[in-house]
Image (cartoon, rainbow, N blue to C red):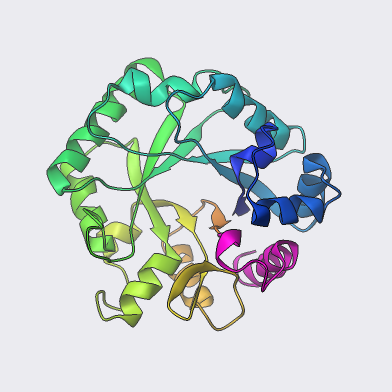
Amino acid sequence: MIGISLPSAILNGSGSFESAHRALLSAYNNDPAQMLGSLRARGVESVEFGVRDRDADPAAAARAARCCADTGLQVTIHGELRGDESPECFFHPYEALQGQASYIITLHGLADMNTTAAALKTLAAYADAHMPRFYFALENNRRRPGGGACQSCAQVAQALKAVDHPRVNACWDFGHFYSNVRNSFESPSPPEDFLARAVHTHIHGLTDGKTHFPLNGDNLPLERYCALLAARGYRGIYNLELDFRRFYPQIEPRTALEESISLLKEVCV
């Protein structure tokens, strides 16, 4: 299944757009439904959007999800893990989500392994009791100073072992991993205990050392990474995660998105 990441503001109708996001929407006549319909016709079946503001009205996430569902698209979420908050606070923005049997929330690790594992254990236990439709995918980050825990696939696997809960698994960020490999921070293949726990992906190209660029056929070993997952029975979403702000206006957002989708479909479908 092919998925894409899109700004939540485009989907929930908030109207608070950055210039790159405005350029994307304007390429579809400023009509989110037209944009989603066009992307669905190209093979997209899922949309991921970010929910990070704990004070946001839960109706905002519900509107974004409904916009996708009305076009026949599934939803995944990119959230934010914080170590100093209650699970009630974490889940507040998601309270109004309806219509889907389950939701995956992708999260980055915290500053250290212990606080990351503790926070995830708390959320998983709360979800067991009160929010059973929600599952979590811990993402591998690109290695950088001050990047905290989970700057490698091995560290994500270590955190998952510490959490030891079936509701908490891994998101393999291809671009972050490839950046680490290119900089000799990780070996060319993730460890088996990481691959076995992958339930979601983030996919983007590495261009001039910068992540979240469009795929161009040679800025990510896409076919090899997809084959590693397929060999282990992966049934999750191959989610394209571009940051339009990083390459606009040099590359038009619609062109970047649609050409990347085409490349992804060639390999993953």
Task: Determine whether 36 is above or below 121 in the image.
Answer: below
| Whole-percent x, y for residue 210 in the image | 45, 73
- Left or right of 91, for residue 184: left
| Whole-percent x, y for residue 136 in the image | 38, 39
- Between 13 and 258, the one nearer to me in the picture: 13
When asked about the image quadrant of residue 260, the answer is bottom right
In the displayed orientation, state which residue is furthest to the right: 29
Magenta stretch, main secondary structure, is: helix
- Left or right of 85, for residue 100: right
- Between 153 and 83, the one nearer to me in the picture: 83
- Left or right of 176, for residue 66: right
- Between 263 and 145, the one nearer to me in the picture: 145
When asked about the image quadrant of residue 83, the answer is top left
Task: Determine whether 136 is above or below 130 in the image.
Answer: below
| Whole-percent x, y for residue 153 in the image | 28, 62
Asked whether residue 163 appears in the rendered view, the answer is: no
The residue stretch that appears in magenta = 242-269
Q: In the rendered structure, does residue 257 fall within the stretch colored magenta?
A: yes
- Between 161 and 95, the one nearer to me in the picture: 95
Image label count:
0
| Whole-percent x, y for residue 101 in the image | 56, 28
Asked whether residue 199 appears in the rendered view, the answer is: yes
In the displayed orientation, state which residue is furthest to the left: 114
Residue drawn 76% across the image and 50% down it: 25
Q: In the rendered structure, does residue 261 fall within the stretch colored magenta?
A: yes
Task: Determine whether 49 is above or below 226 in the image.
Answer: above
